[in-house]
Amino acid sequence: KIHQSYSPMMLIELVVLSISCSTTLVNAFVSITNGKAKISTRNSISQRYDASRQRFAMINGDGVPKSIVVIGNGMVGHKFCEKVLELDSKNEFKITTFCEEPRAAYNRMRLTEYFSKKDIDDLSMAGPYTSDGTTSWYAENEKIEIIIGDKATEIDKISKKVISEKGKEVEFDIAVIATGSFPFVPPVPGIDKDGVFVYRTIEDLENMLSYQKKYDIKSAAVIGGGLLGLEAAKAMSDIGCETHILEYSPILMSRQIDEAGHNILIKKIEGLGLKVHCSARIGAIKGGERVEGIEFSDGKEELDVGMVIVSAGIRPRDEIARKSGIEIHERGGIIVDDCLKTNEDDIYAIGEVALHKGMIYGLVAPGYQMAEVLANHLVNGEAKESFTGADMSTKLKLMGVDVASFGAYNGQHSLVWNDEFAGVYKKLFFNAEGTRLLGGILVGDATDYYKLLSLTKSQNDLSIPPSELILGSKAEESSDSVMEMQDDFQVCSCNNVNQGQLVDAIKSKGCTTMASLKSTTKAGTGCGGCEPLVKNIFTSVMKSLGKEVNTNLCEHFPHSRQELYDIIKVIRSKSFDQILHSHGTGNGCEICKPAVASILASQFNEMVLENHSTLQDTNDRALANMQRGGSYSVVPRLAGGEITPEKLISMGNIAKEYNLYTKITGGQRIDMFGAEKHELPEIWDKLVNAGFESGHAYGKSLRTVKSCVGSTWCRYGMSDSIGLAITLENRYKGLRSPHKIKGGVSGCTRECAEAQCKDFGLISTETGHDLYVCGNGGSQPKHGELLAAGIDEGTVIKYLDRMLMYYVITADRLERTARWLERMEGGIEYLKDVVINDRLGINAELENQMQFIVDTYQDEWASVVKDPKKVKSFKQFVNTDETETGIGFIKDRDQYRPINWPKNSLPLEPIQKDKVAGKIWVEMGSVEDFPVNGGATAKYGSSQIAIYRFDSRKEWYATQNVCPHKRALVLSQGILGSKGNIPKVACPLHKNTFNLQTGECLDTEEMSLLTFPVRIEDEKVMLFLPPTDELDKLLGTKSVMFGAECPSQRDFAELTPF
């Protein structure tokens, strides 16, 4: 083999060597070095031959990477590239990928979103696009080159080159065809008219939008009632077109559902205003140059439409194989074996262009599976796994309707539930004996999809009658009847837990809470479907023992956090009020509001201050950590602890400008303390412009991934621990979770990053990375446990995606990963089974949800500083631009910090209300100045008054802003809620709660608040108050704050500048 990297001298040497070693008559060997010929004897020929073979192996193997050319940069092609780069730790490969579109890979499954968002970057699979159509991901990965806007047209099998439409030639060692498919366009007269579009690419969508706008199209037809056809129809409807769906088959989604399921689906679709025509036989597209209507061949009434979108199936794009002499099927598709290899050595095919055992897979999941199998085969040598076919089970959300099919969804023995009123259809297929679930169809309600799918894959007989899988157990209907069930009745099929085991755990093993029962038995910690029955059994047994039971999240929700997570996932509501109305009571509180806010963030990943600011706990509401006296700390993200000198100087200048106290944290970043809330947007605007983003130190989310310097600098380092730490921190930043998450990466077993005491930690060894999980420091420190050893970076990310999302879904409120694992039945071995072996059959869903979180990440502070409305919410007072601090500052070790709280300090004494009787109505601002179901502060004289807009009760309240406990001027930032029918506010500093009607503290009799009457006049907020001089004597800031005699932090800045 002649390689371009060989020098002329090496080529001559190899040629002469091959001649001399293959001819027995040659007794001497001529080599040319430095322009001189040298004669060698036969004895030295052998030595030189061996040396040259070693040099050849070095260049073809370790010296120069093998060249992989990927033809096609769609979703599957990109996935293959990603997987190769993840697995190729030895740098054995270099990838060139041809992309004929004007931009790199994007998510075609989310094309419909482009109609509403018009944001191409949001669809990208590798980050925001640059001007040339690539992304920074390609620039940062030296081992991959992308050729944009050029189509590969031929593979020269002899010279091993891929030739493009523009004449570019790229040599390959391995070629991978991932050209995907093209839309099938039925040969209907008039199909070539202007106004007919296919639904496949961003350009297709842009052309559709442009055409609709240009000609003001009011009606459109979509040919095809499959997944993409329905998506296209919804998109056209959303832009204001009367939309018709034309399906050739008698039913929609004919590959996934049957006629009864179709009837439920069509009812839902038509309820959205779309019109469905099944068994549609199109005769012609009518019109002149442009579309004017559709004529049916069976005599049906013509449709008056101005556009036609074709989504009637796919055909494999195999033209490059045809031209290159690679074997294809007579009906299309490149024929591949279980290793995805074509009939030609070193040429492979994956995705919708590949025909495997007579099957073309039109879903992205099998394509991804092919990509992973091939990447493993190429990087790891002999295939550790092969592609033997894909599970075609699918769970979709079509126009807001759940549609799922799994296993073998046809057969003679079935049970059906068809509720036309609720819009729910279920059909399950069983073997003749009714002992095995074979498959099923779900429409309208697919909440049991993963549980049922796992049963189809189980090798065990069903432990319950088939009817209970479709109707549910009658035992679930009443907690009074659960004890009538037999002890061997299987309650939790995920973990094979029966009623007898649950009863024994409660009676004999001290399980007096739902958490301890789940931890001991593992019931309810899998898919979660059995948790209501587990709860009923628990309640019934506890009652029989004469013990009181309360496993609710709080008084407002009769559910645990996991139950609430599942409820929100099913109903898909993003409104706390709607969730509370449908599944709770009262007005919420400081417990359930942040819990729901966290769940909403982990499921929908919207900006936390977007419509949910008053649900957020103390720190999340300000996107900063509240400190003593009501000031805040500012913590930018320093991924992996890495920072450039320029950024370090920027932070120093900002801290100097605002006189902030600075400290290096244990998580390898820099905290800046002492910022007032109204200063936060201004400070963050400067930080964002300097290239920083939020560090989420305020959130129950990923905080940091600590690292040592690894092989970058350390002589003992086994890997680039800094690089991996940065990768992980940037991947999981912004992930909202039940509690904070911390990570660590150590470059060797010396463990300088202390990775084993983190929620997840990695230690690099000669064989890969050892992954530890569920450790933590804090008040109950715990060493992490080994989840997997010697794994590569790609596998690390895959396992962490699954583990972290499983934790987010199943953990209790404010439960660290260590406690979560401790209460998990089976502990680390069970977690391994779930994460590594996919015991519950949910790993694909876990990975998809994590990828959604990653893809939809946004820097919260960057969003705030660009939004004047959000910036305004940080203003200290609604009725004045004046500002003031809430605690005195002192100088300490050349920096300024808040004065210490006095030891044994007593709360602010309650103020007699008769001393501050109202005398005048005073305007404090307009209604729109106050957040819905939240509070804001008004300044009256030198006093601060907290005013609360409690819309869910249709009431307004006002109190002093100073919390009597530690005299912090912060009450307006507290969470509103109710205790019984009593409206309350929770102090954001220490969560003391106060009755908003009377001012009484609901936790202790030692404290109370002054309250003031409120009324609304012409959208103006009016308070009934005494004169300012009277109120200031009691509530003036200097009268109530600690350290009033000390200069403020800003005064220090003026007196003693740095």
Image (cartoon, rainbow, N blue to C red):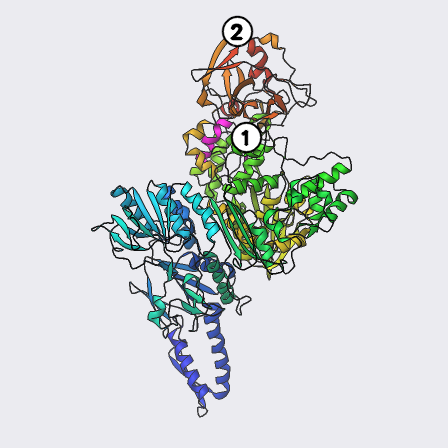
Frontmost of labels 2 and 1 is 2
Q: Residue at 77% of width from left, 45% of height from top? A: 509
> Which of the two discs, 2 and 1, labels the residue nearer the N terminus?
1
| In magenta segment, residue 676 | yes
> Which quadrant is the N terminus positioned in?
bottom left
154 to 742, vertically: above or below: below
358 to 534, vertically: above or below: below
In the displayed orientation, state which residue is furthest to the left.
Answer: 288
Measure how far apart labels 2 and 1 are at the Cα level.
Answer: 36 Å
- Among the 4 quarters of the image, the one containing residue 505: top right
- Point out residue 816 in the picture as x, y percentages from the top left corner: 64, 42
The region drawn magenta spans 666-686
In the displayed orientation, state which residue is furthest to the bottom.
Answer: 25
Residue 645 visible at all: yes
Is 8 positioned to the left or the right of 368 in the image? left
Of 34 and 327, the residue lying toward us: 327
- What residue did someone put label 2 on? 919
893 to 438, vertically: above or below: above
Q: Amino acid at mark 2?
A: Lys
- Point out residue 606 in the picture as x, y percentages from the top left corner: 48, 39
Is 175 positioned to the left or the right of 713 in the image? left
- Density class for disc 1 (Cα within 10 Å; few <14, some 14-19, many ≥20) is many
Q: Amino acid at mark 1?
A: Tyr
- Density class for disc 2 (Cα within 10 Å; few <14, some 14-19, many ≥20) is few
- What residue did someone put label 1 on? 632
